[in-house]
Image (cartoon, grey):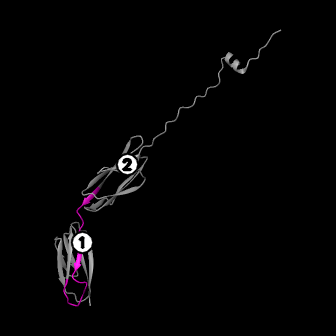
C-alpha cells in the first residue's frame, strides 16, 4: 500500500521553486518646476518731464523672488502691481524674476525724461475788490517758463521767474496768467478782481 503525503501550499511552492508574483513600486515621478515668467512690464506714462513721476507696472508667474534695477529694489512676486518712480534722466529699468529652480527671466524698458514743465508757483493781486479805476497790482512767480502772458492785458514777460503788472479795471475782470515751457506746454492760473 502506498502512502501519500499532503504538503501545505507554501511547501509545494518551495519544492517547485515557484514564487509569488513581484510588483515593484514604480519610481517616483519628477515634479516639473515651471520656469519663472514676466507676464507684463510697462511704464505709465513712458515719457515724462524732469521732476514728474511715472508708474512702473509689472506681473510675474512662478517666481520666488523679484527685483528691479536701478536702484536695486526687492519687489513682491505678484500677478499685477505698480510702483512709483521719479527718474532724474532717461533711465532703463530691468525687472528680474527668479524661479524656485534658480533660473531667471528678465525684461527691460526705458522711461524718457524731457525738460521740466513750466509751472506757476503763485499769483498775488493787491486787492480782489476795488472801485472803478483803482490801481490793481498783479504779480507772479514761475519755474521753468520760457515766457509768461497775462490776459486780457496783452502782457508778455520773458523767462524771468518773477514779474508784476498794473491795471486799472473799470469792470470786474478775470486775469489769466499763463506760463509756457520750452516744449510748448502751458500752466495756467486765473484770478478775478471785482469792481464795485
Find residue 172 and report its image quarter. Answer: bottom left
Pick the quarter of the image with the N terminus.
top right
**Label 1 Cα neighbours within 10 Å, binned few <14 / some 14-19 / many ≥20:** many
On screen, residue 43 versus residue 23, left or right, reads: left
Residue 28 included in the magenta stretch of the image: no
| Circle nearer the N terminus (1, 2) | 2
**Front position in the image: 25 or 46:** 25
Tag shown at residue 66: 2
Whole-percent x, y for residue 129 in the image? 25, 86
Kindly identify the residue that appears in the image at 24 percent across and 69 percent down. 119
Measured as percent of width and height from the top left, residue 188 is found at 26, 74
Mark sitting on residue 120 = 1
Where residue 42 appears, as percent x and y from the top left, is 35, 55
> Could you tell me which residue is drawn at 25 percent across and 78 percent down?
176
Q: Is mark 1 on a helix, strand or loop?
A: strand
- Structural distance between the alpha carbons of marks 1 and 2: 40 Å
Amino acid at each position: 500500500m502506498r502512502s501519500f503525503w499532503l504538503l501545505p501550499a507554501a511547501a509545494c511552492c518551495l519544492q517547485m521553486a515557484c514564487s509569488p508574483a513581484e510588483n515593484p513600486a514604480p519610481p517616483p515621478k519628477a515634479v516639473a518646476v515651471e520656469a519663472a515668467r514676466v507676464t507684463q512690464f510697462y511704464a505709465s506714462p513712458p515719457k515724462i518731464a524732469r521732476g514728474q513721476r511715472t508708474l512702473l507696472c509689472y506681473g510675474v508667474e512662478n517666481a520666488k523672488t523679484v527685483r528691479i534695477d536701478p536702484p536695486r529694489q526687492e519687489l513682491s512676486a505678484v500677478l499685477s502691481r505698480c510702483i512709483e518712480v521719479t527718474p532724474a534722466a532717461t533711465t532703463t529699468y530691468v525687472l528680474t524674476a527668479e524661479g524656485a529652480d534658480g533660473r531667471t527671466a528678465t525684461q527691460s524698458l526705458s522711461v524718457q525724461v524731457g525738460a521740466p514743465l513750466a509751472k506757476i508757483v503763485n499769483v498775488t493781486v493787491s486787492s480782489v475788490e476795488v472801485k472803478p479805476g483803482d490801481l490793481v497790482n498783479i504779480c507772479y512767480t514761475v519755474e521753468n517758463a520760457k515766457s509768461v502772458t497775462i490776459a486780457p492785458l496783452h502782457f508778455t514777460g520773458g523767462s524771468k521767474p518773477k514779474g508784476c503788472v498794473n491795471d486799472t479795471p473799470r469792470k470786474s475782470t478775470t486775469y489769466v496768467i499763463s506760463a509756457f515751457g520750452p516744449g510748448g506746454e502751458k500752466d495756467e492760473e486765473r484770478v478775478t478782481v471785482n469792481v464795485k
